[in-house]
Amino acid sequence: MISVRHCLFSVLTAGLLASQPASAGPGYTVTGFVTTPANASKLQAAWDKLSSAAIMKDRTSRGLLMVNAYDGDNPATHSFVVLSPSLASAEAFRTKLFADPAWAEWQNTISGLGTLGATLRYQTLRSWGDFSDADVVWENFAFRVKDVPAFIAANDRFMATAPGKAFPGQSHVVAVAAGGLSPVTHQLNVGWASDAELEAWNDKYGASAENLAYLADLERCSEFLGNSISRTLSANGATLRSTIGR
């Protein structure tokens, strides 16, 4: 598995080159938000209040409020992430939500706490691991992929190795579906329960022959463009497993 500490050539950016159009199936949207340290707790309180609204109880999607812990020059301090099993289900819930008073209150509150950033849509192509809602640390590795089947096959092969089978988290290959304005075409989103879990696995397997072979496989079919780390602050709605159809 790629690691920040051990990657030899190095879930939030997006791309145009070889990006895929929005289509049916699981995916997610990411909307950036720029706020100040003084307003960060108010933002989370507003999110939690929206999460407790009656309309949120029967949603088939999952919402995440995330802090962008390490994200280069991205001005967004936080991200609103919504995972849905399909575009149709996302549209159906969005239509109901936008007509609900809880949404109007949320919009009014956050308008005084900061500014919205870019919104991007990703399509989930393949997933591996334990799809646990307890995973809150997300490494997001960005690529310009030249051969998508080969890229997915490289991940399949690695997950069948001893280090891959010992991987305690979850990983998802996603394609940029809409909103991309950079060379990035795909991301590998890797979820961990904690920084300690991430570090322990990397210390044991990061320099393994299997991991180095995996990185070489990826290098042959893609160009690595950078990575970020985000952390989940609060979540609501359906389980992660249900939103990706597993």
Image: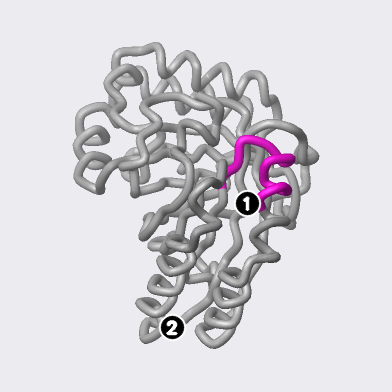
Q: Residue at x 23, y 42 (%)?
A: 199
- The image's mark for residue 16 is none
Residue 94 image-quadrant placement: bottom right
How many numbered circles are shown?
2
Q: Which residue is mark 2?
A: 36
Please name whichever residue, 13 or 7, is drawn nearer the observer in this view of the structure: 13
Measuring from the top left, give residue 37's x and y in whole percent: 37, 82
| Above/below status of 56 relative to 141 | below
Please name whichever residue, 97 or 173, is drawn nearer the observer in this view of the structure: 97
Residue 83 image-quadrant placement: top right
- The image's mark for residue 29 is 1
Q: Residue at x 65, y 44 (%)?
A: 122
Quadrant including the N terminus: top left
Left or right of 77 in this view: 164 = left
- Residue 75 part of the magenta-drawn span: no
Left or right of 110 in this view: 199 = left
Category of crowding for the residue at label 1, using alpha-carbon neighbours closer than 10 angstroms: few (below 14), some (14–19), many (at least 20): many
Measuring from the top left, give residue 184's x and y in whole percent: 66, 47
In the image, which residues are magenta?
83-93
Q: Residue at x 46, y 54 (%)?
A: 228
Please name whichever residue, 43 or 13, is drawn nearer the observer in this view of the structure: 43
Identified by mark 2, the residue type is: Thr
Answer with mark 2 or mark 1, whichever residue precedes in sequence: 1
Alpha carbon distance from label 2 to label 1: 23 Å
Identified by mark 1, the residue type is: Thr
Measuring from the top left, give residue 243's x and y in whole percent: 54, 36
Residue 191 image-quadrant placement: top left
- Residue 86 part of the magenta-drawn span: yes
Measuring from the top left, give residue 107's x and y in whole percent: 60, 76
